[in-house]
Image: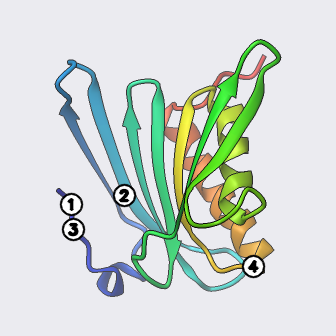
Amino acid sequence: MVAYNYKQRAASSKQQTMKGDDEGGSELHLTCFSQLSDHDDVTLHFHILRLHKQIYAWVGCNSAKFGHLYAAAPTPPNNTVGVTSLIGGASDNIGSGIARRLVLKTGLNILLACNIPKNSPILEANAEKILVQKLISLGYTKPKI
């Protein structure tokens, strides 16, 4: 279990990665980091848990609250994405759009917990950009054709 004091880590962009094996023999990868948003001077916090054929991600700012939880998955055969709200929120909230685009970029099932204030489109775009950049650097995205 990884515990953080976000007030102490607010100015930090350090990253912590943990690896472990689940009961099925697949590796679990946990990546946690914080980064200052480019335009808003707000610290964004990220947790990325890579599971077998899926990614769980949490994005938050200003507090360690869980926020709304969304599930998104590719739906064959036309490569569309289905998204649903599991806890709080609605299908038109911030997290559902991010979850939908993450499925398109990764090809994996996505669980996304999102604690970003409403009516903050620049902050939302920055959070998604940072998250996608990290997923690319970790090798979790589909190669471009």
Image quadrant of residue 11?
bottom left
- Along the polypeptide, which appears first: circle 1 or circle 2? 1
Q: Which mark is residue 2?
A: 1
Residue 5: percent from left, percent from top = 27, 80
Q: Dividing the image into 4 quarters, which one contains the C terminus?
A: top right
Query: Are discs 3 and 1 less than 8 Å apart at CB?
Result: yes
- Along the polypeptide, which appears first: circle 1 or circle 4? 1
Query: Are discs 1 and 2 less than 8 Å apart at CB?
Result: yes
Residue 115: percent from left, percent from top = 54, 72
Residue farthest along the right direction in this orientation:
78
- Along the polypeptide, which appears first: circle 2 or circle 3? 3
Helix, strand or loop status at disc 3:
loop
Helix, strand or loop status at disc 4:
loop
Q: CA distance from mark 4 to mark 2?
A: 23 Å
Residue 90: percent from left, percent from top = 70, 62
User: At label 3, which amino acid type do we have?
Assistant: Ala
User: At label 1, which amino acid type do we have?
Assistant: Val
In this rendering, would 53 be left or right of 68?
A: left
Q: Which mark is residue 3?
A: 3
Helix, strand or loop status at disc 2:
strand
Q: CA distance from mark 4 to mark 3?
A: 27 Å
In this rendering, would 9 be left or right of 95?
A: left
Q: Residue at x 57, y 66 (%)?
A: 88
Circle 4 sits on which residue? 120
Circle 2 sits on which residue? 32
Up-down: is 57 above or below 29? below
Q: CA distance from mark 1 to mark 2?
A: 9 Å
Q: Residue at x 63, y 64 (%)?
A: 127
- Along the polypeptide, which appears first: circle 4 or circle 3? 3
